[in-house]
Amino acid sequence: IFGSINLVIYLTFVILYYETQYLPTLLPVFILIFFGANFPPVFYWKTYLNKHYIPAPVAKDLNEAMKQFAEKYEISKREEEVIQQICIGKSNKEISEALFISLQTVKDHVYRIFIKTGVKNRVQLTNLIRTFQSN
């Protein structure tokens, strides 16, 4: 709907320009109206997002939460790096590329993390880490 408003404004300007030849007077008005028509959608989306978007809870100190998690479950530094990549949502292949290790090494780390923490999948692991962030 907002794009059609810009089209109408543009066509109106073109018609007025070719019929009247008053470019010095019409150009600033056209620019103001044409670009001003883009502000209502911006304000609409800002209001909508402020009203309906609830940001995910963020840890006050993510490093401290990760340190507590690692101490409790005896997680190595490399396993911590793998966990951080898992929490971002990366696949095993993406983790291996990011950390410069083989795919099998990533699978081994993930397996050991699951054994140490007692979780069965990545979602449970992420939820477990979130409990440390909320403390």
Image (tube, helix red, strand yellow):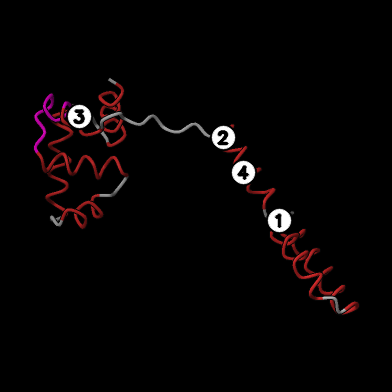
Residue under circle 1?
A: 36
The crowding category of the residue bearing disc 3, from other C-alpha atoms within 10 Å (few below 14, some 14 to 19, many at least 20), is few
The tag earlier along the polypeptide, 4 or 3, is 4
Please name which of the two marks, 1 or 4, marks the residue nearer to the observer.
1
Residue drawn at x 67%, y 49% is: 41
Write the start and end of the magenta stretch as one range: 68-76
Q: Quadrant of the N terminus?
A: bottom right
Residue under circle 3?
A: 64
In the image, residue 41 sits, relative to residue 23, either above or below, namely: above
Q: Is residue 36 magenta?
A: no
| Image quarter of residue 4 | bottom right
Residue under circle 4?
A: 45
Give the CA distance from mark 4 to mark 3: 36 Å
Residue drawn at x 19%, y 44% is: 82
Q: Secondary structure at mark 4?
A: helix
Give the CA distance from mark 2 to mark 3: 30 Å
Q: Quadrant of the C terminus?
A: top left
Residue drawn at x 16%, y 26% is: 68
Whether the residues at callouts 4 and 2 have beta carbons within 8 Å, the answer is no
Residue under circle 2?
A: 50
Whether the residues at callouts 1 and 4 have beta carbons within 8 Å, the answer is no
Indicate the amino acid at tag 1. Gly
Whether the residues at callouts 3 and 1 have beta carbons within 8 Å, the answer is no
Name the side, left or right, on which 33 lies relative to 48.
right
The tag earlier along the polypeptide, 2 or 3, is 2
Indicate the amino acid at tag 2. Asn
Q: Report the residue that reaches farthest toward the right.
A: 19
Q: Is residue 71 magenta?
A: yes
x, y percent for residue 25: 81, 70
Indicate the amino acid at tag 4. Trp
